[in-house]
Amino acid sequence: MSSILIKNATIVNEGKTFTDDLLIVGELISAIGDATEMNIPPGSITIDATGLLLLPGVIDDQVHFREPGLTHKGDINSETRAAAAGGVTSFMDMPNTVPQTVTIEALNEKYNLGSEKLLVNYSFLIGATNDNLDEVLKADPSNVCGIKVFMGSSTGNMLVDRESSLRELFKSAHMPISAHCEDETTIRKNSEKYRQKYGEEIPFSMHPLIRSRDACYLSSSYAVRLAKDYNTRLHIFHLSTADEMKLFSNELPLSQKRITAEVCVHHLWFDESSYNEKGSFIKWNPAIKTMFDREALIKAVNNNIIDIVATDHAPHTIEEKKNSYFKAPSGGPLINIHWLQCLKCGTANFSVSKKLLR
């Protein structure tokens, strides 16, 4: 059994930072402390980590790894290599692939792909539609991490916009519902308004006005109401506005929360002033909003109102991203970023990084 001794590392774990040695035997950490007091197997590899950080692996609860069907952008193997390089050792993959993961058959095929190609720990979400509740309820909570519901624009038929379908889903869900929350009616109205003004050449700086703060709050607040009506375990992905922070609480420990909140790295790093320079390369859904929103999100992470920091890793080709506003896809490759550097943004302090690593 192989073993590795890491000496003199600056270890960040459980909200503490300290210098020590760490021994790995096989696939497990067997000891942390003074190496002279450890039972180190003969032939162990020794790594001198003086001046280096040793961090727990990151769990990324929202990625789009593009397989099956979209592998010209990336595939399960390429994206998990990027994940490992960026310190992400576990991920949860979204269902908007081709075909969409909205049936048990498609879900099982994805797990088969994962068993053959994946290099880190993984799980896959099953996607909800207006009409597939029976399929969703067949998913096994012991190995499926949740149900993904798009309560806003999505690919194919994955927009769930019928109130009856949403209520049945929230009432019957036997595992956490993870929601993308943007109000479709508001987005369509705003899209038409700016299309009339600019035609097809809408400036990317209009993105946060089209996918607006109202669109986000209307949908997020609706999801929270449904979850409270049916005591559903709800997780809301990639929150982007200060207003939405009012929907969540830090009064309970995470283990007791029925409704949890997430922010993505790009909403902590950028604000609307970056659109003129970055254009489509920072076009995400939900849109990046104002400096005021960014600072509110950072504060919410530090105050335990936000529970999870994720990437929403969603690669596209350069050619796709160079299109005009309506043709350029939303999303960007983020899973191999340097997490610690990216989270120490603006007014965020080191507790952001420590919270992520707990």
Image (tube, helix red, strand yellow):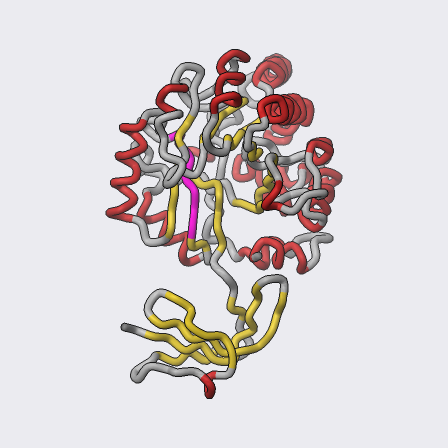
Residue 9 is covered by the magenta coloring? no
Front residue (pair 107, 324): 107
Q: Tell me if 61 is positioned left or right of 101 in this view.
A: right
Q: Pick the quarter of the image with the C terminus.
A: bottom right
| Res 274 → quadrant | top right
The residue positioned farthest toward the bottom in the image shown: 36
Q: Position of residue 112 (x, y in %)?
A: 25, 40
Q: Residue at x 50, y 40 (%)?
A: 312
- Choose between 177 and 325: the one closer to the eye: 177
Q: Residue at x 44, y 15 (%)?
A: 130
Question: Where is residue 170 shown, x and y percent of the image?
Answer: 52, 23
Residue 163 in view here: yes
Bounds of the magenta segment: 90-96
Q: Is residue 185 left or right of residue 109?
A: right
Locate residue 288: give its quadrant: top right
Determine the residue positioned at 64% across, 14% down.
Answer: 193
Residue 62 pos. (x, y %): 48, 40
Pick the quarter of the image with the N terminus.
bottom left
Eyeballing the image, is 17 above or below 331? below
List x then y, in percent, for residue 102: 36, 25
